[in-house]
Amino acid sequence: MSENEENNPDEQPDTAGLQPPANDSYTPAGVDVEPVRLRAERVKAQIRQVIVGQEDMLDQLLISLLTGGHVLLEGVPGIAKTLTAKLLARTIDTGFSRIQFTPDLMPADVVGTPVFNMKTSDFSFKAGPVFSNIVLIDEINRAPAKTQAALFEVMEEKQITVDGTTYPMGDPFFVVATQNPIEQEGTYKLPEAQLDRFLFKIILGYPSLEEEQAILRRFKNDFTGILRETVQTAITPGDIADSRQRIEQVFIREELLDYIAAIVHNTRNNADLFLGASPRASLALMKTAKAVAAMSGRNFVIPEDIRQVSYPALNHRVILTPEREMEGYTTREVLDEIVKKIEVPR
């Protein structure tokens, strides 16, 4: 993003040369996505007061929030995974809860449990911390499979069923989970079915030298984190709901839908992959590509939008063959190769 656009968020970005191809189903006066772009910029401007760099993470968190998905953040300790999630929650006028996953955590500690009321001689449901709008699950891989399984229903269907009674979640409902890829002691590998419920898996690295220098300068006189209190509310749940409706109406050509299907289909017929992506991955690529277009100020999808979200949407949904793992291949290398060899629609 250019400096001028950041300083003037109301200015319409230049989309010259990015007009969609002629198509009878395309309406030139389509959905207005400018409110989506402005809301995303307002949120990022607030978070940037504290967080240095991590622009891709901010974009991908917002894409997930605005399309109704959930995010898994993976990275070593100390690179602001938890802090960013908490700051994002501060920018939204809605509820927030944090759950620290530990090996002794039980499912009832997450979703809630029936409690006997002595006065009425009856059971009443006491909601757990998952009943919120923005839910941060810290170190999700530290809880055993039984506790992790408690998240299956709520993440996919946005409801909890306890003793035959279903309790719906509020809107928005957004789960941000974190995990450390280095530590193995006392951790439990997330099952593939649970990973598939995350829209994105965002893999974070260390900041660059310039970013690290900027971090030190920003916090040299702020040992207690007072700067975090400057982050203010930027959007409301109504803004999120309106943005989702606008994103749904973003135009995508039939050829680009075929492009998405070809990418996902190739993961299932690739000699380097033991497990390919499911149809849920295809839907994820379509939804998130529309969000990228809207946040860029366009009401139509271009191939680059799909390529931009292909890795975070697919990396946790595929598994390398044992042979490729032993040879030192990475999931990114295989997915990049797949995307490169699929012909891009013109």
Image (cartoon, helix red, strand yellow):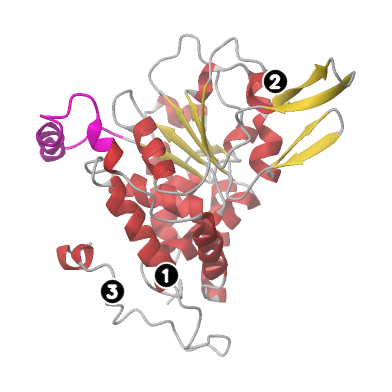
Between label 3 and label 1, give the one nearer the viewer: 1
Q: Earlier in the sequence, mark 2 or mark 1?
A: 1
Q: Find the distance from the CA under tag 2 to the CA under tag 1.
A: 40 Å
Label number found at residue 108: 2
Q: Earlier in the sequence, mark 3 or mark 2?
A: 3
Image quarter (top left, top right, bottom left or bottom right) of the C terminus: bottom left
Q: Which residues are magenta?
A: 205-228
Between label 3 and label 2, give the one nearer the viewer: 2
Q: How many marks?
A: 3
Residue type at tag 2: Ala
Residue type at tag 1: Pro
Residue type at tag 3: Pro
Image quarter (top left, top right, bottom left or bottom right) of the N terminus: bottom left
The residue indicated by pointer 3 is 13
Image spot of residue 82 (x, y percent) = 39, 31
Pick out the residue farthest to the right: 121
Image spot of residue 116 (x, y percent) = 82, 17
